[in-house]
Image (cartoon, rainbow, N blue to C red):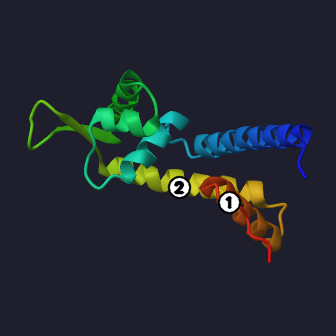
């Protein structure tokens, strides 16, 4: 049975782990010298999951930020050649954002940096512990209780 104190401790541990993951990922990104901020990295990953180039408003909604924040991120990524603004073929007043070849290359580097960071974080765990952690994380992500056998 959990208590408010144990739930508070778990919440604090999750927050500490999240901050550690972010620090390690940032270090791995800096080592690759991509010149991409964590926020820009998130925008690139979000763009990669779209079937066709999204509008800025779509990105803002998906990223849960104000449209102005997306404009700033896109400006920086466009200046470095990672994304480009393109007119919507159906409505020229609408601007869409698409990845460039450089942006796709940066995404490959970002994925490699994330894998390296994950390997570093998970290094102390055995394979059995990793599987257990994966199951627990899926439960937390999905919000469905673990069934006991």
Whole-percent x, y for residue 119 in the image: 71, 60
The mark that comes first in sequence, 2 or 1, is: 2
Q: Is residue 81 above or below residue 123?
A: above
Q: Of discs 2 and 1, which sits in the foreground?
A: 1
In front of the other: 102 or 60: 60
Please tell me which residue is depicted at 76% across the width and 43% down the height of the picture. Answer: 14
Q: Is residue 54 left or right of residue 30?
A: left
Whole-percent x, y for residue 117 in the image: 67, 52
* Mark 2–mark 1 CB contact (< 8 Å): no
Whole-percent x, y for residue 31 in the image: 62, 44
In front of the other: 129 or 84: 129
Q: Is residue 97 left or right of residue 63?
A: left
Q: Secondary structure at mark 2?
A: helix
Q: Quadrant of the C terminus?
A: bottom right
Q: State whether residue 25 appears in this view.
A: yes
Please tell me which residue is depicted at 65% across the width and 57% down the height of the picture. Answer: 116
Q: Which mark is residue 6?
A: none
Name the quadrant containing residue 125.
Answer: bottom right
Give the Cα distance between marks 2 and 1: 24 Å
In the rendered image, the residue lying farthest to the top is 68
Q: Is residue 20 left or right of residue 65?
A: right
Q: Please tell me how crowded label 2 is: few (under 14), some (14-19), or many (20+) other residues with Cα within 10 Å.
A: some
Residue occupied by mark 2: 111
Q: Is residue 127 above or below residue 26?
A: below
Name the quadrant containing residue 112.
Answer: bottom right
Please tell me which residue is depicted at 74% across the width and 70% down the height of the picture. Answer: 147
Residue occupied by mark 1: 139
Q: Is residue 76 above or below residue 33?
A: above
Q: State whether residue 37 appears in this view.
A: no
Q: Is residue 68 above or below residue 44?
A: above
Q: Secondary structure at mark 1?
A: helix
Q: Please tell me how crowded label 1 is: few (under 14), some (14-19), or many (20+) other residues with Cα within 10 Å.
A: few
């Amino acid at each position: 049975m959990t208590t408010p104190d144990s739930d508070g401790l778990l919440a604090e541990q999750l927050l500490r782990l999240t901050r550690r993951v972010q620090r390690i990922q940032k270090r791995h990104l800096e080592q690759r010298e991509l010149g991409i901020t964590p926020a820009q990295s998130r925008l690139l990953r979000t763009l990669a999951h779209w079937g066709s180039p999204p509008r800025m408003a779509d990105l803002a909604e998906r990223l849960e930020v104000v449209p102005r924040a997306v404009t700033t991120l896109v400006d920086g990524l466009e200046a470095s050649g990672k994304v480009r603004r393109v007119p919507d073929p159906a409505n020229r007043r609408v601007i869409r954002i698409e990845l460039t070849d450089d942006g796709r290359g940066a995404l490959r580097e970002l994925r490699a940096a994330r894998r390296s960071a994950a390997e570093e974080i998970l290094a102390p765990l055995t394979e059995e512990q990793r599987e257990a952690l994966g199951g627990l994380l899926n439960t937390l992500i999905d919000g469905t209780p673990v069934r006991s056998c």
